[in-house]
Image (cartoon, rainbow, N blue to C red):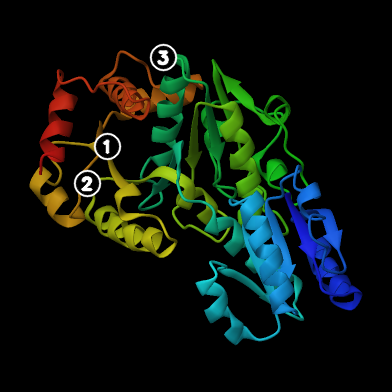
Amino acid sequence: MFQIFLIASDHVRFRLLQYAAVDSKKVGLVRTFDRYPIAGELSRHLHTAPDAVFLDFADRAKALGLAAALRADCPDIPITAIINDPEDRSWLADEGIVSTLVYPCTTEDFEFALHVAILSVKTCVNPDLFAFLPAKAGSGCSTIVLNTAAALANRLDRKTLLIEADLRSGVLSLALNCEPPGSTQQAVRPEQEIDAFAWDRWCASYGQLHLLLSNRSIPETPPSWSEYHALLDCAAACYQKILVDLPELVNPGTSEIVRNAAAVFVVCTQELLSLRLAEQRFRELAGWGVREANIRVLVNRWHDTELSRDDVLRTLRRPIDAVFPNNYRAVRKSLLDGEAVGEGSTLGAAFLQFAGKLAGLPAPTHGRWSRVLHSLARR
């Protein structure tokens, strides 16, 4: 839940704005004013710095003065201007205010303005957050995420959290034959308060790896960006690496994940349809605001008898970050045993190598699969 200041020009406007804020269930009103505060009055309350300030611009001169004072005291706090005329957005943009809310407003209007305000101060991604999604269902994305996360936590000693955001079809609890104490659905409820102790209540463990897993139920209300924002914000303070297993389609809620990830890995195979759908995923991610450099490719179930290296690269038209050999027996054994792929297999070695890359370790140059990766990346 975001903490905000609400400053209205009079009591009537304040009551409607307060209703929209409370009804959104996304904010806590830590300080409210049903009139413009006098000089110095606002500054005394900024010791509890809010996530955003909603400022009524019914009186332009007074509002601009308050906005200047806010910037002087807390330059990183985003300001949402409450306006009567949508055309005011042009001159407000010149003042550096990009989030606006037209009065009178609905709860949906308020939520959208809040989202714009929060995004306006997010100038960098989380370097330790990595999202994975399949180009085509059945590409083995979940297998890659699980084994990479397990290698990070149990082999490379990185405190790692794996979040299963495929709410409808998540299979990680089945892969590990476990009954988690909580679920992703529980963690992203709108009313849910998340703290540092939540992970012990909700997460399953595999060695040193923590997993927040889906129970495959569909929430009545799909999680919004703000629920995922709160989840990732708390996780970032508790874990060194955060990996997220996503379904193939991004939605308005999970857009918060892909926009904040240091890399979004699209997992495909050498199958032609998978490669062509990967191109569609690239376009969709760009449409959600993911930077081009952050959209990456993993090729799973690599087999020398399938499409050649040149054919794969020609279709994808971008470099490949990692390839994982086709090893059905190793994957089947891991599922039967309810554990990660064995370290002694070529596939297990590929997972460990990729985990080392995410951990910032030097990439080994020996071994057959290392040579395949390097030859692909050079193209």
Amino acid on which the number 1 mark rests in the picture? Arg
Q: Which residue is mark 3?
A: 155
Q: Which residue is mark 2?
A: 270
Eyeballing the image, is 1 above or below 201? Answer: below
Closer to the chain start, of discs 2 and 1, is 2
Q: Residues within 10 Å of mark 1 (few under 14, many from 20)?
A: some
Q: Residues within 10 Å of mark 3 (few under 14, many from 20)?
A: some
Label 2 vs label 3, nearer the camera: 3
Residue in the picture at 10% in, 35% down: 375
Eyeballing the image, is 357 above or below 208? Answer: below
Query: Which of 130/246 is in front?
Result: 130
Disc 2 to disc 1: CB gap under 8 Å: yes
Give x and y (percent) for residue 162: 53, 32
Q: Which residue is mark 1?
A: 301
Q: In this view of the protein, can residue 343 be seen by the observer?
A: yes
Amino acid on which the number 2 mark rests in the picture? Gln
Eyeballing the image, is 216 above or below 316? Answer: above
State the SS at label 2.
Answer: loop
Query: Horizontally, is 221 left or right of 335 in the view?
Result: right
- Looking at this view, name the residue that lies furthest to the front: 39
